[in-house]
C-alpha cells in the first residue's frame, strides 16, 4: 500500500518530482565517479610508493656492498703503486750479517709483501663478485643496464682478474729467476706496476660509471638528484673513456683548454 501511494504521488506530482529525481541521479553519479577517481589515484599512488620503496631498498643494499668493495679497492690500489714495493726495507736489513744471509732476509720481506698483495687481490675479487651477484639477482630492476652489466662484469672484470693473477705471478717469479734481488731489473718492475695500475684505475672508473647509472635509474627521480659521471674525479685527461649502457665511449674533458 505504501509503495502504491508513492507511485500515485509521483504521477500526480510528476512536474515537480522528475527534476528532483534527475538531480538525485546526477548527485549519486558524481559521487560515484568521484569516489572511483579517488580510488584509482590512491591505488596508483600506493603502487608508486611500493615500487619506490623496493628501489630504495635495492639501492641501499647495493650501496652497502659497494662500500666494502671501495674499501678493498683502495687498499689494493695503494699496493699496486710502483712505490709500494719494500725495496728500501730490503736494502737496510742487518748489515752485520753476510751478503747471502742478508739477501735471504730481503727475499723474506719480498715474499711477505707478495703474500699481502695476494690477500688483497683475493678480498678485492670477492667484493667485486658480491656486487656482481647482487646486480644479477636484481637485473630486472635495471633492464636498461643489461649490456653495461655484461661489459663491466663479464668483460672488464674478467680481464682485470686475469691481469692481476699474471701480475702476482710475475712478482713471485722474480726471486725464482734471480735469487739476489739487487740484480732484478728495477725499470722492468716499475713498468709492470705502471701497467697494472693503469688497468686497475680504468676498471675502477668504469665501475664508478656503472654505479652512477644505477643511482640515476633507481633513485634519481625519487631523490630528485641525478649524478654526473666522473664528477668526483680530479685531473681527467683531455680525452677519456666512459662506460655507458650502449658501450664504451670517448669523452672530451671540457675543463681542458685547447692549446
Image (spheres, grey):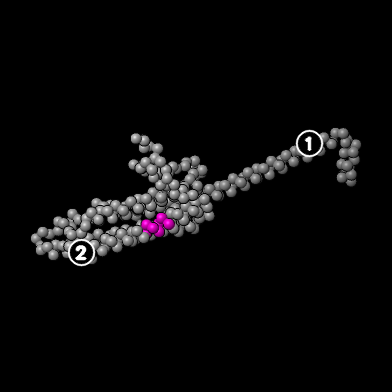
Q: Which residue is drawn at 44% across and 47% down?
A: 249
Q: Is residue 29 visible?
A: yes
What span is in magenta? 155-161
Quarter of the picture holding the C terminus: top left
Residue 112 is a magenta residue: no
Q: Where is residue 213 in the image (x, y as percent from the top left)?
A: 46, 47
Viewer-nearest residue: 114 or 163: 163
Density class for disc 2 (Cα within 10 Å; few <14, some 14-19, many ≥20) is few
Identify the element where label 2 is drawn.
Answer: loop
Q: In which quadrant of the rendered view does residue 110 lie?
A: bottom left
Q: Residue at x 10, y 63 (%)?
A: 98
Question: Which residue carries the number 1 mark?
Answer: 23
Earlier in the chain: of badge 2 and badge 1, it is 1
Query: In 3D space, how far apart are the residues under numbered discs 2 and 1 (Cα atoms)?
Result: 103 Å
Q: Is residue 79 visible?
A: no
Identify the element where label 1 is drawn.
Answer: helix
Question: Which residue carries the number 2 mark?
Answer: 178
Q: Is residue 42 above or below residue 170?
A: above
Q: Where is residue 35 in the image (x, y as percent from the top left)?
A: 68, 43
Density class for disc 1 (Cα within 10 Å; few <14, some 14-19, many ≥20) is few
Assign the magenta stretch its main secondary structure. helix
Q: In this view, does 12 lie above or below 157?
A: above
In the current view of this chain or complex, which residue is farthest to the front?
259
Viewer-nearest residue: 42 or 66: 66
Q: In this view, does 255 lie above or below 139?
A: above
Q: Position of residue 11 (x, y in %)?
A: 90, 38
Tag count = 2
Residue 207: give its label: none
Q: Tell me if 177 is positioned left or right of 217 in this view.
A: left
Q: Which residue is drawn at 37% across and 41% down?
A: 238
Amino acid at each position: 500500500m505504501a509503495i502504491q501511494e508513492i507511485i500515485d504521488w509521483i504521477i500526480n506530482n510528476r512536474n515537480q518530482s522528475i527534476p528532483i529525481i534527475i538531480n538525485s541521479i546526477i548527485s549519486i553519479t558524481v559521487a560515484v565517479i568521484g569516489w572511483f577517481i579517488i580510488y584509482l589515484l590512491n591505488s596508483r599512488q600506493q603502487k608508486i610508493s611500493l615500487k619506490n620503496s623496493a628501489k630504495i631498498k635495492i639501492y641501499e643494499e647495493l650501496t652497502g656492498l659497494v662500500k666494502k668493495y671501495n674499501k678493498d679497492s683502495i687498499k689494493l690500489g695503494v699496493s699496486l703503486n710502483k712505490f709500494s714495493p719494500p725495496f728500501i726495507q730490503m736494502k737496510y736489513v742487518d748489515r752485520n750479517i753476510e751478503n747471502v744471509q742478508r739477501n735471504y732476509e730481503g727475499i723474506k720481506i719480498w715474499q711477505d709483501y707478495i703474500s699481502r698483495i695476494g690477500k688483497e687481490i683475493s678480498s678485492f675479487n670477492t667484493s667485486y663478485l658480491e656486487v656482481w651477484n647482487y646486480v644479477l639477482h636484481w637485473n630486472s630492476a635495471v633492464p636498461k643496464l643489461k649490456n653495461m652489466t655484461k661489459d663491466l662484469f663479464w668483460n672488464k672484470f674478467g680481464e682485470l682478474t686475469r691481469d692481476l693473477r699474471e701480475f702476482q705471478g710475475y712478482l713471485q717469479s722474480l726471486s725464482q729467476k734471480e735469487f739476489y734481488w739487487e740484480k732484478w731489473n728495477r725499470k722492468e718492475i716499475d713498468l709492470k706496476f705502471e701497467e697494472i695500475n693503469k688497468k686497475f684505475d680504468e676498471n675502477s672508473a668504469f665501475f664508478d660509471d656503472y654505479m652512477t647509472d644505477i643511482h640515476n635509474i633507481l633513485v634519481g627521480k625519487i631523490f630528485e638528484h641525478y649524478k654526473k659521471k666522473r664528477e668526483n674525479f680530479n685531473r681527467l685527461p683531455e680525452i677519456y673513456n666512459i662506460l655507458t649502457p650502449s658501450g664504451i665511449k670517448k669523452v672530451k674533458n671540457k675543463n681542458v683548454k685547447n692549446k
